[in-house]
Amino acid sequence: MLIPIASVIYCSVTMHRVVPAIPYMLWVGFFITLCTSLNLRGIRTGIRANQALLAIMTVVIVLVVVFEIQYVSADQGVRSLVSLTPFYQPYVFEIRTIATATSFAALTYIGFDAVSTLAEEVENPRRNIALATVSICLITGLVSVLIVYLGQLVWPAYQEFRDFDTAFLDVSQRIGGNGLFTAMVIMLVLANFGSALTGQAGAARLMFGMGRSGTLPQRLCAHLDPNSLQSSYNVYFVGAFPWWVLRHWAMKLQESS
C-alpha cells in the first residue's frame, strides 16, 4: 500500500516542478486515476504498459550514464572517474543523514516482494518468481549505485540543489542541457508511474488471495470482474487509499501553515 503512495508523490512533485500552474493535488488525482484505470483493464494491460515504460527508461538511463562520464572526464580524463569522494567526505558526513537515507532505501526495496503476489500469472513460478526477485534487486542496486556515484562527481556536495526533492533533474540539466532535463523528467515520471502501477496490482492481488482464503471479506475482496478477470473492488480500494492519505496530509499541512 505504501508503494503507490510514494510513487504518486514523486510523480506529482516532479510534474508540479515542471508545470507549477497545475496544483500538486490535481497531479495526484491524475496519476491515481490513470493507474487505476489501467489496472482495471486486467493484468496483461499493466504488463504491456510496464514493458513499454521499461524500454523508454532504459534508453534514458544509458544516455545519462554516457553524459555523466563525458562531463566528469572532460577536464582531467578517465582518472577523474575513480574517486572515494562520493562515498565519504569528512566535512559533510553525518550519521543522521546516513540513517535517513537508509530508511528511504529500505522503503524503496519493499516493492520487490510485490513480484511474489503475481505468482499465479507466471509460468513455472517456483523458479521464475525467485529469479525475478533476486534479479530486480541486483540490477536495480548496481544501476542505482553507478548513476548516483557519477552524479555525485558531477555535482559536488558543497553545491546546493534548486529543489532537493528533484535533485537529479539539476544533475541532468548540467550534463545534458534542457534536452536531457526533459528526458529525465519523462523517465522519473514513467519509472514512478510504473512502480505505482505494479504496486497497486500487487496489493490488489494480495487482497484477493486473503479474501479467497477468508482472511478478508470474501464477497468484496475475492470478487473477480468477469471481463478483465481482475479483482476490481480491490483495485478501486488501493486506488482510493493513496488519494485519501495524500489529501488528508495536504489538509493537515495547510492547517499547520
Image (cartoon, rainbow, N blue to C red):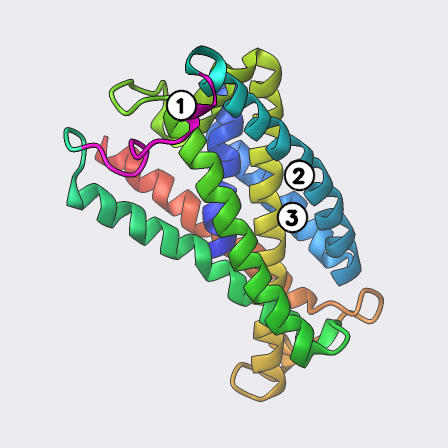
**Main SS of residues in magenta:** loop
Secondary structure of residue under mark 3: helix
Q: Nearer the viewer, residue 80 or 221?
A: 80
Residue type of the residue flagged with mark 3: Cys
* The disc label shown at residue 58, or none: 2
Marks 3/1: CA–CA distance: 42 Å
Image x and y of residue 230, in percent: 73, 67
Is residue 186 in view from this perspective? yes
Residue appearing at x 74%, y 62% in the figure: 43
Label 3: few (<14), some or many (≥20) within 10 Å?
many
Upstream in sequence: badge 1 or badge 2: 2
Q: Which residue is mark 3?
A: 35
Residue type of the residue flagged with mark 1: Ser
Q: Nearer the viewer, residue 146 or 76?
A: 76
Upstream in sequence: badge 2 or badge 3: 3
Image x and y of residue 163, in percent: 36, 23
Image x and y of residue 229, in percent: 79, 70
Residue appearing at x 75%, y 43% in the figure: 52
Residue type of the residue flagged with mark 2: Thr
Upstream in sequence: badge 3 or badge 1: 3
The answer to which image quadrant residue 62 occupies is top right
Secondary structure of residue under mark 2: helix
Residue appearing at x 77%, y 75% in the figure: 123
Q: Nearer the viewer, mark 3 or mark 1?
A: 1
Secondary structure of residue under mark 1: helix
* The disc label shown at residue 80, or none: 1
Give the extent of the magenta segment: 77-89
Image x and y of residue 88, in percent: 24, 37
Label 2: few (<14), some or many (≥20) within 10 Å?
few
Q: Is residue 196 magenta?
A: no
The answer to which image quadrant residue 227 occupies is bottom right
Q: In the image, is 255 to the left or to the right of 120?
A: left
